[in-house]
Image: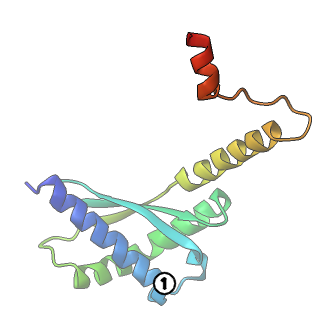
Amino acid sequence: MPTPQRLQRIAERIQEEISEMLVMGEIRDPRLSGVTITGVKVDREFAYADIYVSAVEGSQRAPEILEAFNHASGYIRRLLADRIELRVFPRLRFHWDPTPERADRIERLLAALRSSTSTPGAPEQPTAPDESEAEDETA
């Protein structure tokens, strides 16, 4: 049974190789422009590699992108098998990763909160007392 470290190294290598294929234009599907490979997880039996993808435009393109990857999965698997030496190469399963969209939404909410608290006329935030004030209170 492979160690967790070996599984992680293989997953990272698969992620690197697919990302490179996308950047170098080896996968020539226009539906895959602007796509990012956000993560890869390989199961312990090397039966499947779950590949998580995201796009700049967000989840509205998810069905189109997943369809393109599923259509090209055999080709991508063959290219990966030529580059990564494994006795048996796992089947590829593609999944949409909503994490970047969620992170962006959280960032926008935090920015809105920051801007609403720093607007003129808003109550000021309490500040920590100076050291001299703290000494006066204890004396």
For the residue pair 55 and 108, the one nearer the viewer reads as 108
Whole-percent x and y of residue 32?
Answer: 56, 76
Residue 46 visible in the picture: no
Quadrant of the image containing the C terminus = top right
For the residue pair 102 and 31, the one nearer the viewer reads as 102
Q: Look at 17% across and 57% down and name the residue there.
A: 5
Tag 1: residue type?
A: Val
In this image, 54 relative to 133: left or right? left
Quadrant of the image containing the N terminus = bottom left
On screen, 28 above or below 51? below
Residue 20 visible in the picture: yes
Residue at far left of view? 1
Whole-percent x and y of residue 21?
Answer: 42, 83
Whole-percent x and y of residue 41?
Answer: 31, 57
In this image, 48 relative to 45: left or right? right
In this image, 124 relative to 41: left or right? right
For the residue pair 132 and 1, the one nearer the viewer reads as 132
On screen, 41 above or below 131? below
Q: Look at 80% across and 41% down and name the residue there.
A: 118
Q: Look at 63% across and 67% down and name the residue there.
A: 56
Residue at far right of view? 121
Hey, which quadrant is residue 13 in on the image?
Answer: bottom left
Label 1 CA crowd tier, 10 Å (few <14, some 14–19, many 20+): some
> What is the count of numbered marks?
1
In this image, 22 relative to 129: left or right? left
For the residue pair 73 and 54, the one nearer the viewer reads as 54
| Residue located beneath label 1 in the image | 23
Q: How is the image coloured?
A: rainbow
Whole-percent x and y of residue 20?
Answer: 41, 82
Callout 1: SS: helix
Q: Look at 64% across and 45% down and name the residue there.
A: 106
